[in-house]
Amino acid sequence: MTEPADRLAGLTSWHSDWRGLRVAVYGLGVTGFSVADTLVELGAEVLVVTAKADEERAMLLAVIGAQLLEQPELDTPPDRLTAFDPQLVVVSPGFHHDHPLLTWAQERGTAVWGDIELAWRLRDKVGTPADWIAVTGTNGKTTTVQLTATMLVAGGYRAAPCGNIGIPVLDAVRDPHGFDVLVVELSSYQLHWVNRNAGGELSPYSAACLNIADDHLDWHGSLDAYRAAKAKVYTGTQVACVYNRADPATEHMVQEAEVLEGARAIGFGLDVPGPSDFGIVDGILCDRAFLEDRFTSAIELTTIDELREAGLAAPHVVANILAAAALARSYGVEPGVIRDVLTAFRLDAHRIELVRIEAGVSWVDDSKATNPHAADASLRAYDSVVWVAGGLLKGVEIDEIVKRHAARLRAVVLIGVDREALRSAFARHAPDLPVYEVDADETEDVMPTAVRLAGEVAQTGDTVLLAPAAASMDQFADYAERGRLFQAAVNEFFGGEADDQSASRPGDG
């Protein structure tokens, strides 16, 4: 083992000696800046490498004392990077795992960490390290993380949601007030880089993989590689491995995981729970895992009727609630606290958000459905749908969702650049279904056209559903902009903002 590798293996604390360590940080998004800021605070020498730098972050780098290498083409290592001779590379999630700069680092024997490994090593900055509850899955991560953190806070714990949810974990571990527990949303990109280096192995208090479906195959290269990345969430789990009974792949991950002695497998699902499970009995959400007599008894958490009143009764949302409840109960949150949280909790914007109801037609924004698995869950919540779909498909197959839901579709309005794959799938599996296409070059023209087409075909009792099953970056800045423009187009189509009485969610009556 070389001297630098020995040194890196020993850097397992905020209080280790990081001074003078030469670190190349790849990427200058929210995560990349948090990495650079942290390492400079530790006394490391930092060079940030990016194809394009946000002006404000570039200015802040100069203020904190980090170097910036901005170069549009990064197909080969820039001379400045090779001259810097990094002892460590910390990569942002946006960098593809086989990017030429990562290949260069690995070929020269330079260790590569992600921001999650760095945060895990530094988690003792403000005293006793916070426990981590780790959450991943193809869909539902953010809602589950928010629910779990809210339940923990209501239960009296100092808790925070962080990670892929938008708040870098490094910002959370550096918070001067400290936390009892961090609920960490982990993407497959982040998980790809964990548990690869001595000294940086994660050991979450509890962990969950909510579901697995084709997604990000363009990044990982195969479904097996994507699943392998997701499965890392369970490695080293201390107390509870929460898995989805309706998704055998997640249970298999738990069975194969190397966990700490005493860690339990806790299943969740929309069916009747067995011992050590969370589930539903006669419309009642139940905990049969965290009670002494779990073989003959269950604890009531809430009811489907109560969730319906809160706009949380869509099946995939109920599944997220059960997963969050399992994670919160694993940390000691009382059932009554969970019930109170669910009475007040509301989903974020662009997640099955009812925009308005006009002439018996519901207009729903689920722009966050950025892959077929999420769109499938959204479509299941409605009986008759005019589906607004399309965007960047990210290499996933679309045939199965088209075949499964063809019978509930009145028509389809296609947007985005990958319309050919969708068009072909409908021709194969629903040849008589009306399919309309939005061929707009300008972002501001896409949604007004889509809404007009949908409005012309929708009938009383239908739901016009924006659930694109695809990423948004072909025509929009992100899924949020896509959803905002859809909502604006709907309101414009009907001549103004909706009345408050129509701003409810699926299942509200």
Image: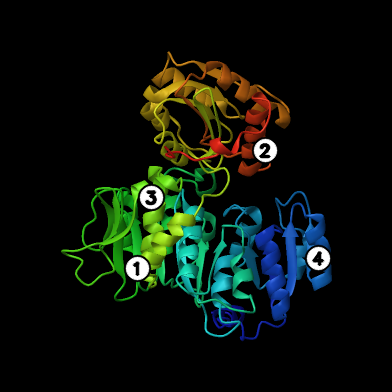
Mark toward the start of the polypeptide (1 vs 2):
1
What kind of residue is marked 4?
Leu
Q: CA distance from mark 4 to mark 1?
A: 41 Å
Mark toward the start of the polypeptide (3 vs 2):
3
Which mark is on residue 60? Answer: 4
Mark toward the start of the polypeptide (4 vs 1):
4
Asked whether the beta carbons under mark 4 and mark 2 sit within 8 Å of each other, the answer is no
Which residue matches tag 1?
A: 240
What kind of residue is marked 1?
Ala
Asked whether the beta carbons under mark 4 and mark 3 sit within 8 Å of each other, the answer is no
Element type at marker 1? strand
Local crowd size for mark 2, using a 10 Å CA cut-off: few (<14), some (14–19), many (≥20): some
Residue 234 visible: no
Element type at marker 3? helix
- Marks 1, 3: nearer the viewer: 3
Local crowd size for mark 1, using a 10 Å CA cut-off: few (<14), some (14–19), many (≥20): many
Element type at marker 2? loop
Drawn side of residue 154 relative to residue 35, left or right: left
Asked whether the beta carbons under mark 3 and mark 2 sit within 8 Å of each other, the answer is no
What kind of residue is marked 3?
Glu
- The percent coordinates of residue 28 (x first, y second) are 71, 59
Q: CA distance from mark 4 to mark 3?
A: 48 Å
Q: Nearer the viewer, residue 426 or 133?
A: 133
